Image (cartoon, grey):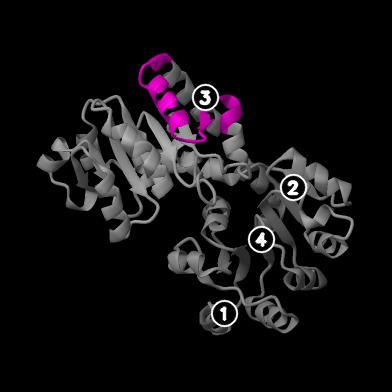
Amino acid sequence: MVAGEAEAFAMLERQRTDGARWLWFHAASLGEFEQGRPLMEEIRQRYPDWKILLTFFSPSGYEVRKDYKGADLVCYLPLDTPRNVRRFLKAARPSMAFFIKYEFWKNYLTELRRQGIPAYSVCSIFREQQLFFRWYGGFYRDVLKCFTHLYVQNEESRQLLQRIGVTDVTVAGDTRFDRVVEICRQAKDLPLVERFKGGNDCTLVAGSSWAPDEDLFIPYFNRHPGMKLVIAPHVIDESHITEIISKLERPFVRYSQATDESIRRADCLIIDCFGLLSSIYRYGEVAYIGGGFGVSIHNTLEAAVYGIPVVFGPNNRKFMEAQGLKACQGGFEISGKADFERLMDRFFSDYGFLDKSGKKAGNYVRDHTGALQKMLHGLQGKLSS
């Protein structure tokens, strides 16, 4: 990261085209990038004369997306010091800046305002406990007032901002809903997974799982011969794959080693490569989303968009979409093994309940699309000029 930040200035000078107009998007890491991605790609399609600069703070974002074709230049963002800020903006010369979700950089935002460069916060979300809303949070409130406009995810955020005098706010929603609908439309056909599933109508897809998750669903799978299981673990190193295999008591196959013959004999398919999970969910009747017994759950929308119920552990409170799925009864929180087993028994014995739950999950996703169009509507005057 330190080396990448030092290289950023040289990259800007080396790859910029004189006279071009640039939009600058900044994402802390990969998750924030995915929220800003729909806006970047739609702008690129509708307004091809604009060039796009994409910056990251975290190596986990930059290293994965440094070759992203939706931007003309991808680099690290140098640390938020007054000298770095002045040097960066002189080299980048953005016409507009977009900070995704939780990105509030004091010196960058202050200098953008001083230079008259519009700055937007997109897909941001605010909570009562944040420093902006504490009696001693004046410094942080001043940062928010540097934005030209904030596109927030929900009404609660708008009301909190209004309370501290920030009124240039639009409740747009979350572009992740738009993104997963688009991913669903473009989902890959996976012949090996199709052959694995066969005619089975009791298939559980476990996505981004960790060991505590696997300790819940693998014993259940072992005891239910009518069920098939697809495991796409969050970590696919050999030690974790070996740990998963040691818990299985029924025939399995690794995706990377599967043949037409071995895939048909297997009851469990282990996905030991990246990039397939969002397409694999379509083959399940139920999705289990990992991480809820650790730091936090992973992406529930990628599964829910296919109209299947999603199951996850208790660490989901900070995720608006998880709360929404629970409220509409398309998502189900479990606290342990007994909860999980009761829920799975009901899903696979009451297909009416399974079908209704899945439809509620799918409808929830589709009912919350539209954030992208709301933001574009607000920005079109600036982008067209």
Q: Could you say whether the residue bearing mark 4 is in a helix, strand or loop?
A: strand
**Badge 2: few (under 14), some or many (20 or more) residues near its Cα, within 10 Å?**
few
Circle number at residue 211:
none
> In terms of sequence position, does the residue under pointer 3 or pointer 4 come before the other?
4
> In terms of sequence position, does the residue under pointer 3 or pointer 2 come before the other?
2
Residue 222 in the image, given as x and y percentages of width and height: 27, 34
When the figure is inspected, residue 2 is found, relative to residue 292, above or below; the finding is below
251 or 304, nearer to the observer:
251
- Say which quadrant the C terminus sits in: bottom right
Circle number at residue 360:
3
Q: Which residue is mark 2?
A: 127
Number of numbered discs visible in the structure rendering: 4
Q: Which residue is mark 4?
A: 98
> In terms of sequence position, does the residue under pointer 1 or pointer 3 come before the other?
1
Q: Tell me the distance, in whole angstroms, between the alpha carbons under discs 4 and 2.
A: 21 Å
Q: Which residue is mark 1?
A: 5
Q: Nearer the viewer, mark 1 or mark 4?
A: 1
Characterize the magenta stretch by its predominant secondary structure: helix
Amino acid identity at mark 4 = Phe
Q: Nearer the viewer, mark 2 or mark 1?
A: 2
Write the residue at 88% across / 51% down: 164
Amino acid identity at mark 3 = Lys
> In terms of sequence position, does the residue under pointer 2 or pointer 1 come before the other?
1
- Residue 289 within the magenta-colored segment of the rendering: no
Residue 14 in the image, given as x and y percentages of width and height: 52, 83
Q: Tell me the distance, in whole angstroms, between the alpha carbons under discs 3 and 2.
A: 27 Å
**Badge 1: few (under 14), some or many (20 or more) residues near its Cα, within 10 Å?**
some
Q: Tell me the distance, in whole angstroms, between the alpha carbons under discs 1 and 3.
A: 45 Å
The part of the chain drawn in magenta is 325-352
> In terms of sequence position, does the residue under pointer 4 or pointer 2 come before the other?
4
Write the residue at 52% across / 79% down: 4
